[in-house]
Amino acid sequence: MGSTLIHPGPVRNKKHIMTHTVKMNLNCPMPKFDYDKITLGHGSGGLLTHRLLKSGVFDLFKNSMMDQQHDGASFEIQGRQAFSTDSYVVSPIFFPGGNIGDLAVNGTVNDLAMCGASAKYLSLSFIIEEGLTMESFWEILVSIKKAADKAGVMVVTGDTKVVEKGKGDQLFINTSGIGPIHPRAQIHHHRIEAGDSIVVSGNIATHGITIMSLRKGLGFETDVRSDTTNLNHTVIHLIDKFGEDIKFVRDPTRGGLASVLNEIAELTQLCYQLDQKSIPIDPQVEGACEMLGLDPLYVANEGVFVAVIKKEITGEFLDLLKRDERGRQAALIGEVNTSYPGKVILKSRIGGSRVVNYLTGEQLPRIC
Amino acid sequence: MGSTLIHPGPVRNKKHIMTHTVKMNLNCPMPKFDYDKITLGHGSGGLLTHRLLKSGVFDLFKNSMMDQQHDGASFEIQGRQAFSTDSYVVSPIFFPGGNIGDLAVNGTVNDLAMCGASAKYLSLSFIIEEGLTMESFWEILVSIKKAADKAGVMVVTGDTKVVEKGKGDQLFINTSGIGPIHPRAQIHHHRIEAGDSIVVSGNIATHGITIMSLRKGLGFETDVRSDTTNLNHTVIHLIDKFGEDIKFVRDPTRGGLASVLNEIAELTQLCYQLDQKSIPIDPQVEGACEMLGLDPLYVANEGVFVAVIKKEITGEFLDLLKRDERGRQAALIGEVNTSYPGKVILKSRIGGSRVVNYLTGEQLPRIC
């Protein structure tokens, strides 16, 4: 639609994110923007918004399905869907292994995957603090597009607000997503039984420690990289193969593995018995946890899921998962039993057992 | 689910917003919270989050459809849907006629309505600045619930993040919504033709002036109240009656009426001729605009829509709209013609005509 290319129209950014239809190379340099920093005017819905979007943002998020100047996207969908939302306030917004942009895409894609759903449509909403450099914003936009393409999800609608200096913190992002639930998915804690196996898909605590190691005043550095990634293809592949024998999956983000397991322990009134020595963790991450006095069981993950599965499929499940690049470090970490109803129990390396409780207070603020 | 009531489980707030099944009176006083202010711990996903949600928030958002501890909501959905998102950063968060909570519900409900859709499912995501009083938070939660009930939309999933003092501004809210598009809706600027009528549903510039009148240092007060309300029932009722004769509807929020009309003028390359004396505006609002040197055509609205309709239905359309409490001040404000392609032209009260351009820069930051 030629006129759209020339005149995308400015009332709300979101109605224009999708209107451009010119192919763009993701590795292209930053377009020439009128300004080197985001100003309040870029959130006005007026001419500055218009220029900002026209000068490259449309190109990046062009989307053949979308050529609407509506207040929202529209599409046909049928059947059982999952719908999820998350706001991302991670600080700093750039970190080894990713930034707030791909984190925001992966986080919501993964929330849907944990419902047994393939993310299909994503909304994207920015709250920008005045003064964010166009260079940072562009880098994040490109990461969002790359992460969305990798996950196979379409960004179909969006919004941009700008707040005054000191009223935000560079950039907050909300993503909401919707997608069809796999017909074989029967993921619900109700289905967990004594005897089931507890599996994690990879090394734990990596994302949390990556962020912590960047925070001022910690006095140490690691070369640990965030594990942020999309888990949808991995999880859907497993559901495809094992169906209802996968009883529960969850990505242990804020609050870590301990919080997820405490939650289902309470809900199921079963005992979740973990074997510390079998829980996969990178030695550097473990070292950092010791230095910081953090229990890795409470530290956030962004590219790992925990699954409770029927004992009989454990071997096959792990074999399949380990063949996936996202499951290389997958491990059986424990079992569900009835010994301490409603509790998470950790058998330590030296053999003793302890109760793993809920996280109290805030351990790692703004980790995601 | 008894156990859910006792143990909602804390990993992410959103997975718990929906888990309670005890009826609650919306006019009940604020529950006893453990804290009088939001702390970082309330965003941890740990025990504080758990307690916060347990102590009344579940009750408020209890939702018969939802009893899931998933990372998202799930539901059956069929056919053509609209999907929209918006983040709300209005400052101050409380204002005459509403607060950021009902604004956030109405805004997204209205965005869907402008696509011809009835909002059905809503996500709700908070970014709270540490120190927000529980009293303010509760008041906003109750407003959200009331606005959602009024609009007939279900809050089905949510998320809460907390940022440090000085890294946010009390409260930001994102709502994303999805709902079925009316089978008779054919709303697209492509369908606008010369001869069509331009109608607004009510007094313009009310919300923007309400917020401006509250801002520090303005040195004046009005008793104007924000027009924030849900327009979905009104718009769907009109679509039901007039179908494809309604060619375009849009709620002129940020950037006001001038920006919406400039956008479609550019897209359609038709001329949008307005008659100033027929544009409904409250005298106090008009007075405030004069004091502030603001053109009401650029000032934000939150409870008004502009429609471009087939000329032949204008009388009937206005009659029906005026019978709706949200359309009492509805008026025919102009017509589409070919005199100045791509332009919005205003015929002033004294008879002269001028071009109404895009808003340049930022007129009213953080109006929504």
Image: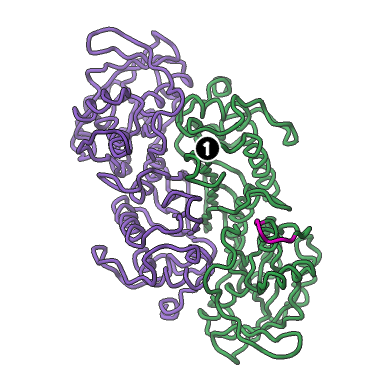
Chain colours: A green, B purple
Horizontal side of A321 relative to B354 (left or right) equals: right
Q: Residue at x 45, y 69 (%)?
A: B67
Q: Please state the horizontal and vertical placement of residue A271, each as a whole percent of the image.
A: 59, 86
Residue A4 drawn above or below residue B28: above
Q: Is A219 colored magenta in this rendering?
A: yes
Please tell me in which quadrant of the rendered image residue A193 appears. bottom right
At a point 37% along the width and 41% down the height, the residue shown is B110
Could you say which is closer to the camera, residue B46 or residue B354? Answer: B46
* Quadrant of the snapshot with the C terminus of chain A: bottom right
Q: Is residue A343 visible?
A: yes
Please say if A214 is above or below B330: below
Q: In the rendered view, does A261 fall on the left or right side of A227?
A: left
Q: Chain of mark 1?
A: A
Mark 1 surroundings: few (<14), some (14-19) or many (≥20) residues within 10 A: many
Q: Is residue A190 above or below residue A167?
A: below
- Where residue A102 sits in the image (x, y, percent)? 65, 49
**Image x and y of residue A8, in percent:** 53, 25
Give the amino acid type for the residue marked by disc 1 in the picture: Glu
Residue position for label 1: A130
Question: Magenta stretch containing residue B97, yes or no?
Answer: no
Q: Quadrant of residue A311?
A: bottom right
B335 on left or right of A196: left
Which is nearer the eye, B237 or B294? B294
Query: Where does the magenta region start and end?
Result: A215-220
Q: Compared to B190, does B322 lie above or below?
A: below
Q: Main secondary structure of the magenta part?
A: loop
Mark 1: secondary structure: loop
Q: Position of residue A287 (x, y in %)?
A: 76, 70
